[in-house]
Every structure is written in structure tokens, then in C-alpha cells.
Amino acid sequence: MRLVINIGDNAVGVDGTFRENLDLSQCGLPENFWAFQWNERGDDTGHIEYNAPDVINDEVAAMPAWATACVAVWQAQLDQEAVELAAAEAAAAAEESAP
């Protein structure tokens, strides 16, 4: 999995599918956090980028729990969009078949 989290847009991208304006407030993001990138290629590597000039970016070898929480928020948004799309399609089909 390729994961990108950008706090400036409250955006999470998983394998190139991005959602913005997510509520990440309950994910426990690090202080001064700006972005996180993770690339699972068999050598699971990632890095945390900070927006404080005196803080050095962190290289990580395991996905942090807060990043997993962000993926859960992203998945919940995708699931909600799928439910809304299915409801809209069902309403359109019902309208078409109405006498």
C-alpha cells in the first residue's frame, strides 16, 4: 500500500485514491506534523514530515497507529460515498420505472 497523509488539506491517499477535508482530529497526529508518506514494497518504509524548521523528518520502519487511524477515516469516507451512490442509483432507477 502506498499511503500519503497531508494535514494541510486534511487529505489521505491510499494507492492513488485521495479524499480531502477529512476529519482527522481523533487520529492522534503528531505535533507539528505536516505530511506522512508510506510505501509498502516488501521493505515497508516511510517518513514523517514536520512543518517546524527545527524538527528533522523521521524515517519509520513501521506504520504508526495514528496513520492506521487516518486510513480508517479514509475508508469510512469511501464507504459512505458508495452508500450515497447506491442510493442515488436506486432512486434514479425507481424514477425511470415509475408509470
Image (spheres, rainbow, N blue to C red):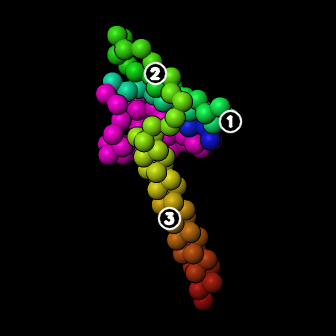
**Would you say the residues marked 1 and 3 are in contact, meaning their CB atoms lie under 8 Å apart?**
no
Q: Residues within 10 Å of mark 2 (few under 14, many from 20)?
A: few
The span from disc 2 to disc 3 (Cα, nearest Å) is 38 Å
Element under label 3? helix
Element under label 1? loop
Residue at which label 1 appears = 42
Checking the image for residue 84, the label placed there is 3
Instruction: Decide whether residue 40 is among the magenta residues.
Output: no
Residue numbers of the magenta segment = 4-31
Left or right relative to 46: residue 10: left
**Would you say the residues marked 1 and 2 are in contact, meaning their CB atoms lie under 8 Å apart?**
no
Q: Amino acid at mark 1?
A: Gly
3, above or below 76, in the image: above
Residue at which label 2 appears = 58
- Quadrant in which residue 50 is drawn: top left
The span from disc 1 to disc 2 (Cα, nearest Å) is 20 Å
Element under label 2? strand
Q: Position of residue 15 (x, y in %)?
A: 63, 41
Q: Position of residue 89 (x, y in %)?
A: 59, 70
Q: Is residue 27 visible?
A: yes
- Name the residue located 42 percent from the left edge and 14 percent from the top edge: 56
Query: In terms of sequence position, does the residue under pointer 1 or pointer 2 come before the other?
Result: 1
